[in-house]
Amino acid sequence: MFNGGKETYDEVRCIKLASERLLSFVPFCHGQRILDVACGTGWATIPAAKAIGENGKVIGIDIADKLMEVAREKSD
């Protein structure tokens, strides 16, 4: 189901809003290690990686491999 919506997934506003809200509650620290389960196209994963800096590590996983492809493209 999610792989089928690869092209339009990022247009679903409630996903973006939920990710932004989640990020507002996270006390990020430089060098932190984070696992983002069900990361989709990286709405939370990519900003989290920027927040923790180069010494940190964020791993995003998702059952929808097509959404992971989009997340990888966006993170480059």
Image (cartoon, rainbow, N blue to C red):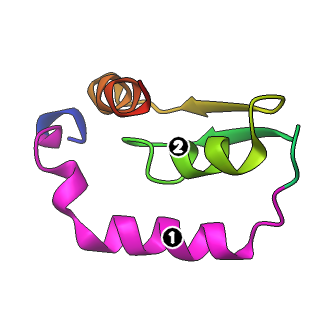
* Image vertical order of residue 11 relative to residue 22, above or below: above
Q: Quadrant of residue 7?
A: top left
- Residue range of the region highlighted in magenta in the rendering: 5-28
Q: Can residue 38 be seen in this view?
A: no
- Looking at the rendered image, the quarter that the N terminus falls into is top left
Q: Which of the numbered marks, if any, corresponds to residue 46?
A: 2
Assess whether mark 1 and mark 2 are in contact (beta carbons under 8 angstroms): no
Rendered location of residue 58, percent (x, y): 69, 34
Residue identified by numbered label 1: 20
Q: Can residue 51 be seen in this view?
A: yes
The tag earlier along the polypeptide, 2 or 1, is 1
Rendered location of residue 29, percent (x, y): 88, 53
Local crowd size for mark 2, using a 10 Å CA cut-off: few (<14), some (14–19), many (≥20) = some
Q: Check residue 17 for magenta coloring.
A: yes
Q: Which of the numbered marks, if any, corresponds to residue 12?
A: none
Rendered location of residue 9, percent (x, y): 21, 50
- Name the one closer to the observer, 57 or 13: 57
Local crowd size for mark 1, using a 10 Å CA cut-off: few (<14), some (14–19), many (≥20) = some
